[in-house]
Amino acid sequence: MSATVLAAPAVAPHAGGGGRLRRMKPMLGVAPFLLYTALFLLVPTVIVIIGAFQGDGGSLTLANFRELFSQSVILQALVRSIVLSVVSALIGAVVGAVVAYFLSTAAPGGLLRKLITSASSVLAQFSGVMLAFAFLFSFTGRTGLVSRTLNSWFGIPEPDVNYFASLAGLIIVYAYFQIPLMVIIFLPAVDGIRPQWREAAESLGGSTWVFWRRVAGPLLTPSFLGALLLLFANAFSAFATAAALVGLGSPLITLQISNALTSETGNGAPNLAKAEALIMVLIVAIVMAGYYWIQKRSSRWLG
C-alpha cells in the first residue's frame, strides 16, 4: 500500500503533461486559422462596433445612427444595395442551378464537366476592377468589340457608357460572377441525388414531375436556399466592381462607407462610416445564420 502511494507522484506529472499535449495537438493545427480569424475578422468587427457608438470626442453616443437614419441618401444606398444583391443572387442561383443540373448529367470525368467546372472556378473569382474594365472595354465606346459586332450584325444599339453604372447595369455585371459561383456551390448537392432514387420513383409509377416535386425538389431546396443566401452576402459586400463602374457616385452602401472614410473635402465621418458598416455586419450576420441553419438541415438529409 505504501509502495503504491510513493510511486504515484513520480508517474502522474509525466502522464498529465502528455495528456495535455495530446489534447492540444488538434488545437495547434487550427491555430493559424484562429489567429487569422482574430486579426482580420474579430478585431475589425470590434473596432467597427466601438467606433459606431463613439462621437468625435470619443464619448459614447447614438448620434451616428440618428444621422444615418436621417439621411435619405444613405437609406437609398442601403435599399439599392439590398435590391442589387437580391436580384443578382436570384439570377445567379436560378441560372447556376440549371447549369449545375446539366453538368450532373454529364460523365463525371468527361471533358465538358472538367471544362465548365474549371471555367466556373476562375470566373467566380473574376470580379473587382478587372471585371468592370472588361465590361467597359467590351461593350462601350470605340473599343466595344462585342457591342460593335452585335450592332453591325443584328442592329442592336450599343449601350451608353453610363449604362453599367446604373442599377440594371450593375445587376448584369454582378451576375457574371454570381452564376459561376452558384455552379461551384450547388453542383455537389445535385451530384448527391442518387440515380437509384429516380429508378425507385419510376418503378412505383412516378413521372419525372413527381420525382422532382416529391423527391429531388425537397432534397435540393435547403442547398438551393443556402446557396442563394451566400450569393446575396457575396453581392452585398462587393465593392471594387461598383467603385470602378460608378466612380464618384454613391448609389451603394459600400461606396457610401468609402466616401465617409475618404472625403476629398476633409469632412470625413469615420464614426458614421462605422455605423453604416455595423448595419452591413448585422445584415450579413443574419444571412449567414440562416445559411448555417439551412446547410445543417441539408447535410442531415443528404448525409
Image (cartoon, helix red, strand yellow):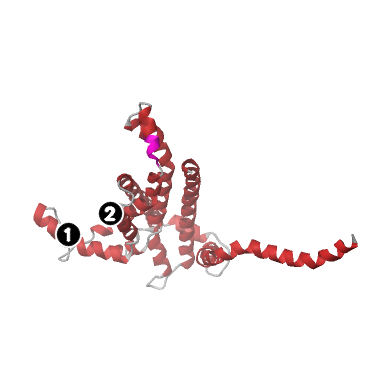
Residue 222, image x, y percentages: 44, 42
What residue is rendered at 45% in x and 58% in y?
Answer: 68
Res 260 quadrant in image: bottom left
- In the image, 20: left or right of 143? right
Q: Position of residue 255 (x, y in %)?
A: 37, 62
Q: Quadrant of residue 169?
A: bottom left
Q: Mark 2: which secondary structure?
A: helix
Residue occupying image coordinates x 52% and y 69%: 56
Establish if 87 lies above or below 43.
Answer: above
Which residue position is annotated with label 2? 111
Q: Amino acid at mark 1?
A: Val
Q: Nearer the viewer, mark 2 or mark 1?
A: 2
Residue 90 vertical placement versus 115 (above, below): above
Give the magenta part as a residue range. 193-198
**Where residue 146 is drawn, which disc sits there?**
1
* Nearest the eye: 92 or 33: 33
Whole-percent x, y for residue 13 in the image: 76, 67
Q: Earlier in the sequence, mark 2 or mark 1?
A: 2
Residue 200 location in percent, x, y?
39, 32
> Which secondary structure type mostly characterizes the magenta part of the structure?
helix
User: Element under label 1?
Assistant: helix
